[in-house]
Structure formats: structure tokens, C-alpha cells
Image (cartoon, rainbow, N blue to C red):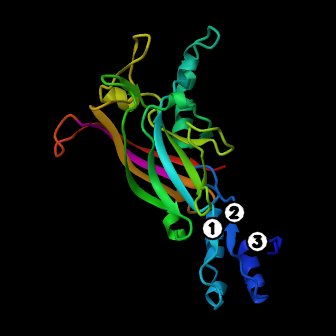
Amino acid sequence: GELMYVCGKIENLLPQLASQNIFPDIIISEWMGYALLYESMLPSVLSARDNPAFANHNNLKAKPKMMPSRSVLFLEGASDDRLSFWNDVYGFQMSTLQHSLALEYASDAVVETVPSTAIVTDRVALLDMDLDTIQDVDLDLTTIPFVLTSCGGEGVKVRLDKLVVSFDIGFESGDPKVEFSTGCQSTTTHWKQTTLWLDPMGTIAKTNGMKTTDNNDTVDHHLSIETNKSEFQGRFTMKRNRLNPREMDFEILWEIVDVTNTEHNKRVLCDGCIRSKLGS
């Protein structure tokens, strides 16, 4: 067969090629951004996949195959005690900086590498995308329910400071299948992970009387969950920013629930809301 190289904006190229009776069999694109959908490049690829020119081509049995063909968005919880650094900076007490830093952490999603040792919950899928069929309207995620449970042992409270967003990518039409992950447990990629802070100053946890005992037997007020006793649950929203669709707006409504009660009588230990933006 022949391999043709063409350069240009994909939305414009395909109609031009169709006019020459040239139709692609596959579309290969590295459209992924931070938190999978940042920069909103996928809609351009989908518009190429669904280009009306294909519908008028009688000999085309199917739309072009997408490569990669599958992507899955994940969420997990992590601990992070970076604010405690300011309690003793080479002998100087600089904790007054903690409040302003906490506000920054809480308002902006952060792209960073999270070590696997910081992960304290299971990793759950928020969205599983078949890229041969998904539509543009599906790319704004609205109030997707999730539940995170502790990875700690029985009777161990794990401190929960932030949520970690990552994704996996799959090329599933080949043999063997090829896939890679941007999760904390895998080799670091340039996408790293995207983090959303919960309660940096421990205000919510302290108000609700929550305590976490660290390895030094000191007591901190921070959000925590415990295996078979409590879980972190909520609804996850990630949408394109209305003014700049390349940026992403996050809203996560969450609560920590006592699961020792009956199914119909779970007690909410504390709750809150994350509102963050991923952008310039």
C-alpha cells in the first residue's frame, strides 16, 4: 500500500482529501492533555472521524478507526503534608504562609508527579471512552458518582489531602493490544497527574472533630478514612471552561461516610466541595 503525508488542520484536510476521492482508514492522534481532556484537542479529532464527506462515499464500509481506541479516566486519593514544611524552615517558624498557600492549592488544579507511596485509596474509573463511538457532548463530565475506600490495613486511619486524576490509554485493535497508564503506580509520563486539594488547613476536619494520628503519635486534624469503617464518596464534574474551552473547570461534591451503620442509615461524618480550575 501507499502512505500519504499531508499537513494541515484536520477539520480542513479531510474535506479536501474527500474531494480527491481519498479517504483515511485510520486516524492516529496524540490528543491527550493533562487530566486527559485539557486543551480540548479531542473534539477536533472526533469531528474528523465523523466528517460528512465519509457519508457520501459509497465504498466506505465504516468510519476511520481511531488510534488510540480507548481511554479511561481515573480518580484516587493521596496524602500530602507539604504545608508542614513551613512550621520549621531551617529553624525559622513561617507557618503564617500556610493560609495563603492553602488558598492557592484549593483554587487551582496542580499538574505534578505523585509518588505511589502517597496513594491512600483505591483507584476508580470515572469514564471509559470508546473512541470509535464517543461524541463531543460526552466530553463534559457532570456529577459522575464515585466511592473511594482506604488502602490502609484494618484499624488504620489514612490521611486524605487531595484527589489525583490520571488516565490510561489503549490501542485495542492490534494483536497484541498495546496500552499505557499515567497513574501513580506506573512509569512517569509528561502528563504526570492532576491533583485537586480537599482541605489543606484541616478546617473542615477540625470542625467535624476528625483526627489522624501519624507515626510520631502526634494528633493532627485532617480528613481521614478507615478500612471497613468509613469511605470517601461524591460526585465528580469536569467541564470545558465557558470562556476558554481549552481550560477545565472541576467541581467535586464530597462526603466522608460512616459505613458501619446499615445501608439505609449511613452517617455523614463531614462533607465539602472542591472548585478548581486547570488552566493558565
Along the viewing direction, whichever of 24 and 256 lies nearer the viewer? 24
Q: Earlier in the sequence, mark 1 or mark 3?
A: 3
Callout 3 amino acid: Lys
Is residue 152 located in the magenta-colored stretch of the structure?
no
Q: Name the residue under label 1.
A: 66
Quarter of the rendering containing residue 156 = top left
Is 203 on the left-hand or right-hand side of 45? left
Which one is closest to the eye, mark 3 or mark 2?
Answer: 2
Which one is closest to the eye, mark 2 or mark 1?
Answer: 1
Q: Name the residue under label 2.
A: 29
Q: Residue at x 61, y 78 (%)?
A: 63
Q: What stretch is highlighted in magenta?
A: 250-259
Identify the secondary structure beneath mark 2: loop
Vertical order, 86 against 141 (above or below):
above
Measure how far apart labels 3 and 2 are at the Cα level.
12 Å
Callout 2 amino acid: Ser
Where does the image place residue 172, in percent across and percent down from the top left? 58, 60
Where does the image place residue 185, in percent across and percent down from the top left? 55, 36
Q: Earlier in the sequence, mark 3 or mark 2?
A: 3
Callout 1 amino acid: Met
Is residue 254 located in the magenta-colored stretch of the structure?
yes
Q: Residue at x 51, y 29 (%)?
A: 118
